[in-house]
Amino acid sequence: MADIPAKAEIGVTTGPIRGSKKIHVGPLGVAMREIHLDPSSGEPPLRVYDTSGPYTDPTARIDIMAGLPQIRRTWIEGRGDVETYDGREIRPEDNGQLGPDRSGGVPQFPRTGLNRPLRAKPGINVSQMHYARRGIITPEMEYVATRENLGREMLKDYVRDGESFGASIPDYVTPEFVRDEVARGRAIIPNNINHPESEPMAIGRNFLVKINANIGNSAVASNVASEVDKLVWSIRWGADTVMDLSTGRNIHDTREWIIRNAPVPIGTVPIYQALEKVGGIAEELTWEIFRDTLIEQAEQGVDYFTIHAGVRLPYIPLTAKRVTGIVSRGGSIMAKWCLAHHKESFLYERFDEITEIMKAYDIAYSLGDGLRPGAIADANDEAQFAELYTLGELTKRAWAQDVQVMIEGPGHVPMHKIKQNMDKQLEACGEAPFYTLGPLTTDIAPGYDHITSGIGAAMIGWYGTAMLCYVTPKEHLGLPDRDDVKVGVVTYKLAAHAADLAKGHPAAKMRDDALSRARFEFRWRDQFNLSLDPDTAESYHDQTLPAEGAKTAHFCSMCGPKFCSMKITQEVREFAAKQNAPVETFVAADEAEAGMQEMSEKFREKGGEVYLSAE
Amino acid sequence: MADIPAKAEIGVTTGPIRGSKKIHVGPLGVAMREIHLDPSSGEPPLRVYDTSGPYTDPTARIDIMAGLPQIRRTWIEGRGDVETYDGREIRPEDNGQLGPDRSGGVPQFPRTGLNRPLRAKPGINVSQMHYARRGIITPEMEYVATRENLGREMLKDYVRDGESFGASIPDYVTPEFVRDEVARGRAIIPNNINHPESEPMAIGRNFLVKINANIGNSAVASNVASEVDKLVWSIRWGADTVMDLSTGRNIHDTREWIIRNAPVPIGTVPIYQALEKVGGIAEELTWEIFRDTLIEQAEQGVDYFTIHAGVRLPYIPLTAKRVTGIVSRGGSIMAKWCLAHHKESFLYERFDEITEIMKAYDIAYSLGDGLRPGAIADANDEAQFAELYTLGELTKRAWAQDVQVMIEGPGHVPMHKIKQNMDKQLEACGEAPFYTLGPLTTDIAPGYDHITSGIGAAMIGWYGTAMLCYVTPKEHLGLPDRDDVKVGVVTYKLAAHAADLAKGHPAAKMRDDALSRARFEFRWRDQFNLSLDPDTAESYHDQTLPAEGAKTAHFCSMCGPKFCSMKITQEVREFAAKQNAPVETFVAADEAEAGMQEMSEKFREKGGEVYLSAE
């Protein structure tokens, strides 16, 4: 049993992020991170959004074998609308035909006692959308409101500045605002009642832009220890949700390890496991096997399911002339099934039955874009938009049962075609949150696709996409390792933040300003600590100026002491201060905008004197 | 003399880029690169733009101590309007007070004979703009036309697709088009008559988007060997021009080594060296010292000068309330000079005299944005735009003497404020080429600023910026090493290409399509070779699937054999091909766009039969 992790083997990174302190705010103990600044700054600690869970809390006891505390359990049971029952038994096919001893695979997560999952009492809907539509503000919604407000209360005389393309970002987020957004379907709070370890978060155009990180075993590589490590590693750097895209064997057990240790929502693509159960032969998939897989994963606590119900039989021919055909795994599996059986997709035909399952566990739909373009040449084509409009139709069908929905988007799209994706999605899907993969803005840079896609992600996030699925440097080439996961997450965090800034999110600019003040005042440590990746920032600085003194030096290696423009600017200010008038009164600001001719005349009128007397 | 490079010490990377062959096209022998594809593709070699010079030509003899062949020398002398003369003597202050033996510094470049530079005969203007305006098509313009056409002749039934925001990108570039663009000032061909080693290239909104890489010694680090290596390394990966931003000692000699070995235009910021000559004390700068420095660098062959003549005395107060004040080195040096002397900038006042020098050597202006914003908080402010309008005024003054001009731009700008920069520049500067640094779209990711700025660079390139100045991962933190230079260059190449795609450049999409076809057909080697960085692409692939066989495997490590969507898509096509009707005729394409209801009715009408008989 080669890759069974002993406790020591599952090593995850714990401890605070450099320069930061984990805090818990309000009666619900909403997790946040405070970045403390040098006293010379005279600034209060800056609060930032924190997705890292207990792993960055020095006071928390971390035991991967036991899983995380179930912070939502009392909220869920307190509503009195759920019941425990004898869960579905784990079968060999759930783990690629491994026997109960898991020989050759990964061990079962040490569950305490029997499998007694929660589900809604008969006839009850436990989705956050259902509560919201009945006017109920849940603790989950309150948690989200506090979490999203992040520092806004510190804002003084703040002036909104941004272009939000019709979004309705509030100055301040109230629990009622969260409820209303969820009720309208403009935001989702993905949290399966069987994943009480998760900290509630919202995905919606009027909230902070979120990012997702993909992890998971594949048939050719990876193991459970490294996947749990990648989970913890990705949320440390800011992943808001994590998708377990495991294929191959051990799918069930790998997922169990991940969910029990995940403080963020976990998403999956159930068709992957269903396909494994039929030996990888798409034609042999059946509704019964798929349904059984949904129940299996619902009981484990998966928070959102990617369902490719928009890949309809009549759309498949539209992909035949594409440069890269169908690039979505789920999409191609369903396309093959449809053709083999000459039948409409069972995901489409059984959609309402799937919705029945979703609402019994509060699982959110992530309606998959199985026909997304896989190349610049295929962007915004008939197949893609035909599917999108079907996803819009399915959104309304899910909403009719008060089930939460988000919509997956492309893919590979050149910059000039990105906005059309957002516009059509808003129109077709009634403002349901958009969740895009990139998009990649060119095909020619494998090895750098976190960047080709980070460009598209920042832009579509600005236009209104609610969550950005990360792309790592290994995209199209191999499986991301730990470093790739970090680079992918940080790249997408900066893209999401750039989008929040451009949308005019009230709190977004606070961090940029704090970092820029630190930069201007040569508070190097503050500059490192305020960055998305303090470790990398400091190590890059040290590669050129390793000396400890350089951390406080009033210059840096780029220009050296003589050339530092920041230093010279400060001298300019001091110089001006020494004069008998403040620098602002040299010349009235408005004059500066006047044309040159006028300026020089004024200048001459004043006898070439720059410093005007104060009176 | 610690860091004097022995011949062996200046190691530069030579040899072809993997999978590519250097070719020389037409009577002028225009350098290009051909990427050869696997015979199974049935595709001709793909021609790509090549900036790498002789270093990637296996037949070229490279000798750093001798410099590159002077390919333009006969063109320049053939015009009969230049003369050689006794050049200015190199003085100790040119190299930070080093004596003639260069003790403690870098050695003099082994010049053959005396310093006998070229300059225009008295009263003559040798700028490309001057020739263009007199209707003369120079070999430089012909070279540019061939170079920019790159593959367009291979285009069959090509449909323009893009949004160019008012640019006039032609289907095919003629020498006359190049002449006209240069005459109108919409493009520049920077090539000092004393840099005959350079291969002509154009910077303009209607040509391919170009990128610049910065290198150079600083007071605290670097040496000549590593700078020459960085030069060769940066053009290998695609830098179209290189700026030598050296400070500290050895400025003159470092620059000489760089220019003599540079097949691309070299830019500098002369004020840096002038400041060194006065011991780093800005107040002690004089017009005479600056003018002497211009002549010194003009004789060496610098192709474009960054001149911060727009930093005018009245604008300085506008920066006083900024978060990061003045972040441009040249800008802050001039600001300090202006305040110290209570005088208008001598760069502004002597502008026409500077222009006289420029036209005698055909040096292009890069009018510096000394007041560019250094933080998101300072973007698009009064100071920035006051300077921009002055740069517009100076552009017209330079054009009045037929001297080529481009305009430098920001900086740090959130996404929603980027387009305004482009729009105002076009308006203020009469479509003179815009040359921007990034812009960075957020301040919070030091260590990743090649990406925060790559986002802004791709966008502003799309809007119309002609050249993008790269930013490396070390920006704000330290001096870029070899790896940082490569990452910066490749990041900016992909941003420039994404911009070309979005603008609808006729030839841009050919490479994306070729790579995507290779991807779909599992031609792994072709996919690597067609990418901007074949070495990285292949090494990433090999990290997961090192086996040689994997290079031809019809699947990859992400999904493994069972799950590969590309493989399934191909099966879908084969499956369809086996049927008695082509896949396109399952259902008419237009039906696919019809609503679901209609679709299912049609579906039923056809008795649920998917395959319609051919007649």
Image (tube, coloured by chain):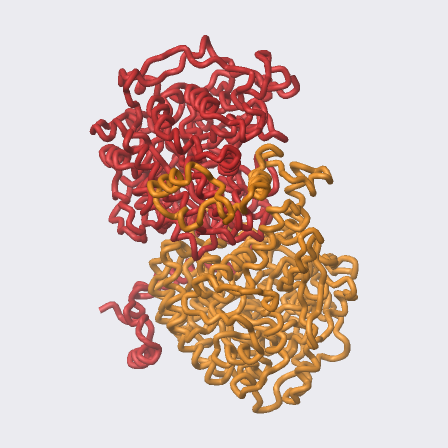
Chain colours: A orange, B red
**Nearest the camera: A416 or B477?**
B477
Position of residue A309 in the picture relative to residue A581 (left or right): left
Q: Residue at point 54% right, 87% down?
A: A135
**Nearest the camera: A435 or B329?**
B329
The percent position of residue A349, horizontal first and vertical second, equals 43, 79
Quarter of the image with the N terminus of chain A is bottom right
Q: Is residue A431 visible?
A: yes
Position of residue A146 in the picture relative to residue B589 (left or right): right
Count of marks placed on residues? 0
The percent position of residue A4, horizontal first and vertical second, equals 74, 60
Q: Residue at point 58% right, 44% down?
A: A577
**Nearest the camera: B37 or B225?**
B225
Q: Quadrant of residue B246?
A: top right
What residue occupies the far bottom of the structure in this picture?
A123
Position of residue B364 in the picture relative to residue B274 (left or right): left
Q: Residue at point 53% right, 50% down?
A: B321
Q: Is residue B553 visible?
A: no
**Nearest the camera: A84 or B302?**
B302
Q: Quadrant of residue B398?
A: top left
Vertical comparison of B123 with A331: above or below: above
